[in-house]
Amino acid sequence: MAPVRRQDRTYRLTDFTPNTQDLIAVDMLRTIGVIDKIKVGDVAGAMPKAALKWAALPEGPGLANHYPPQPYVEYSEFLASCRAAGGTGK
């Protein structure tokens, strides 16, 4: 499998399973400085920065994404997915 490159590192992946993708996402959230907000349930506070990385994320409750006309998930749907995965959110 070809390496996945990011500006500051190269991931030497052996697969691209959902679990591997989740680990990459956590690392990216840590790198942009929002992982601690997410861990304490401040998902809305993390969204503006996270939405700059992921075009499909809204910038927060009641807001669209940062890159129109890119399709995006509504904040309520995103928060429901977080909660279904065991997270909390305000």
Image (cartoon, helix red, strand yellow):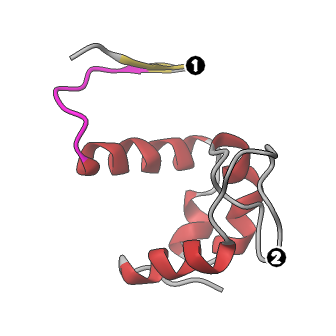
Quick check: 43 above or below 31?
Answer: below
Residue drawn at (57%, 77%), measured in percent from left and top? 77
Nearer the observer, 82 or 38: 82
**What amino acid is found at the position of numbered circle 1 in the picture?**
Gln
> Is residue 47 in the magenta section?
no
Q: Are marks 1 and 2 in contact (CB under 8 Å)?
A: no
**What amino acid is found at the position of numbered circle 2 in the picture?**
Gly
Residue 66 in percent (x, y) is at 81, 48
Q: Magenta region: which residues?
A: 10-17
Residue 47 numbered mark, or none: none
Side of 53 relative to 23 (left or right): right
Residue 7 numbered mark, or none: 1
- Earlier in the chain: of badge 1 and badge 2, it is 1
Spatial separation of the CA atoms under disc 1 and disc 2: 31 Å
The residue beneath circle 2 is 62
Looking at the rendering, in which quadrant would you find the N terminus?
Answer: top left
Side of 63 relative to 86 (left or right): right
Residue drawn at (64%, 80%), measured in percent from left and top? 76
* Mark 2, secondary structure of its residue: loop
Q: Residues within 10 Å of mark 1 (few under 14, many from 20)?
A: few
* Mark 1, secondary structure of its residue: loop
Overall secondary structure of the magenta stretch? loop
Residue drawn at (45%, 83%), measured in percent from left and top? 83
